[in-house]
Amino acid sequence: MTQLITTELVELDRNLGNDPEAVIRHLASKVAATGRATEVEGLFADAYAREQKTATGIPGGIAIPHCRSAAVTEPTLAMARLDPKVDFGAKDGPADLIFFIAAPDGADQAHLKLLSKLARSLIKKDFTAALRAAGTEAEIVELVDGALADKPAAHAAEAPAGAAPAAAAGAAAAPAAAAASGSGPKRLVAVTACPTGIAHTYMAADSLVAAAKEAGVDLQVETQGSSGAKALDPAVIAAADAVIFAVDVDVRGKERFAGKPVINAPVKRGIDEPAKMVQEALAAAEDPHARRVPHFGAEEQAEQAAAEKGEHIGQKLKRALLTGVSYMIPFVAGGGLLIALGFLLGGYDITGVADKVVLENSFANLPEGGLAIYLGAVFFKIGALSMGFLVPALAGYIAYAIADRPGIAPGFVAGAVSGFMGAGFLGGIVGGLLAGYIAHLIGTWQVARWLRGLMPVVIIPLLASIVASGLMFLVLGGPIAGLTTALNGWLSGMTGASAIVLGIILGLMMCFDLGGPVNKVAYAFAVAGLSAGSATNQAPWQIMATVMAAGMVPPLAMALATVLDKKLFSLAERENGKAAWLLGASFISEGAIPFAAADPLRVIPASMLGGALTGALTMAFNVTSQAPHGGIFVFFAIGNVLMFIVSIIAGTVVSALAVVALKRWAAPKTTATVETVPATV
């Protein structure tokens, strides 16, 4: 196996800059210089993007920037002992020991286990003390190799990393009944997981085990990381008094912990505050009102983490809406493009004859008009059927965001009822929320153990469907349908100046939060009316074109701005700018999020200015789009495509010039300051 670290990858007592960006870039260049990465920029961009999501500083003056990158050719460690220290976001101050972990996208399990073992060693005081005392690069390499090989010298004083498996074995052998009777010490179980699964996952596990040992508590941890996961013994889980989830991603197999009091937090808290998490878990074990893992399966980790922080009703509604729209988009994108292809091949008249052509003809029996008409009818019908899932999918996955899997069926049914009654996407939103909250409420019922298995697959879907869909039929569907009809009629009648005002409003909404709830409401509104468009009623297609064009402006504008004045943007932003050209052209507004996260007070207003101009122009020039997604790549589905492009270019130039002007003169430059504070996006 290739050596993970060599003397060429070690820097001792060097000043590598005053912020994480400079340090990471220097270490990335060392990895590339040794031939272990194909390029510096790609590796740096991946590592720094990871750093901006979550700080990699940990207590004890240590930082572990890390990433998986296509630029890395073999798993590598680069180490720097800094003088002066640099702030990597740890609560106890800046770091002087920096380990840069660079893993290829397809790193094998053996290498990943070694990288994980190193990360676990770094929370041991004797190991870090030896690293600080080392006089040469060769000593550092020897110490690291010793830690990876489990040599006693690297593990003499403290061994929390080894405590986890040893304790786990002991717990597995201990009778579960003794723990359940309360005769022994308190027992806890935990799951740790992070997005990359290389460092934080295992360090959090060992920190929690060490903290529990000091408190006299038996704690077993399941690490769901890149180097593989060994599931906790069911007997250990059954004997546990409470569970800790220190995770940044969904817990796999969360239903195994059903009914246990739960403490849920980001994985980094398991490193920074393990003792507090253990004490919170012990308190939850004694609290009959403590939050528990639901009996009906794996409720989304994001909901639990947000609830721990006091998520209010507005945030819950926003998250549910975004979930519904994100799952709806694939149905709409494919269906809309197929409808556009149907019109392209069969003409606008295909809407009235598609059913008959598809049912009565085949390749061996082509209709009048030939192959083009037949294929046009087939494409149109497939697209129309796909678009028919728009409202049910929206409602179903809104309910899923609230109640997890038991909410899907009631949500789909409520969405289908909404479509049947003509309540449209507004009815789908209302029906999805009803179904989700009703399913969630039913899921909290305390039922007999023999009935629990039927709850998620029979009882919750049945009762929630009856209540939610019943309310839609009997009370809510009619008024919402009336409102939808009136709204569509008003929009269809908009011409001239009023249409331009609508374009400005839609443009502002699309650029306000770059893929957030306001953006998604505008997009869902446009998509919901798309199927109602026709040769005689092109207003829905105009709205779709306006929304798509305005949504393309922010990433394109940020890409252009990085070209106009590179000095105003960090290296990471300039790298993001390169990708933003394609993201913007593809109608992915989220391509501008890295810029907005670093400088929202200048990027967002500038984006909204260009988006409003683009929205006004597309409406003024009667630009239409029969496709709900795809940007410039669905040019064949766009009417007046030349003015579509002109409108986008105009908005892009205005936004780019505005953001450059604001960065130069509106306020002092704060790029470097922002980048030293990891941003969670």
Image (spheres, rainbow, N blue to C red):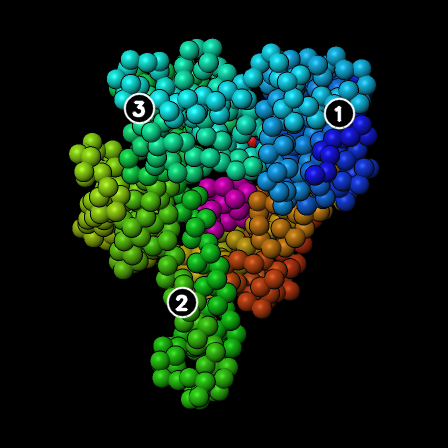
Dividing the picture into quarters, in which one does residue 197 lie? top right
x and y percentages locating residue 152 in the rendered image: 64, 18
Residue 646 shows up from this direction: yes
Residue 172 located left or right of residue 123: left
> Could you say whether the residue bearing mark 3 is in a helix, strand or loop?
helix
Counting residues from the start of the chain, the first of labels 3 and 2 encountered is: 3
The residue beneath circle 1 is 141
Provide the major secondary structure of the magenta segment. helix
The residue beneath circle 2 is 384
Q: Amino acid at mark 3?
A: Ala
Disc 1/disc 3 C-alpha distance (Å): 44 Å
Counting residues from the start of the chain, the first of labels 1 and 3 encountered is: 1
**Magenta residues, as a range?**
505-524
The residue beneath circle 3 is 176
Front of the two marks 3 and 2: 3
x and y percentages locating residue 244 in the rendered image: 41, 24
Residue at 80 percent across and 15 percent down: it is: 135
Residue 8 located left or right of residue 436: right
x and y percentages locating residue 98 in the rendered image: 70, 23
Q: Amino acid at mark 2?
A: Ala
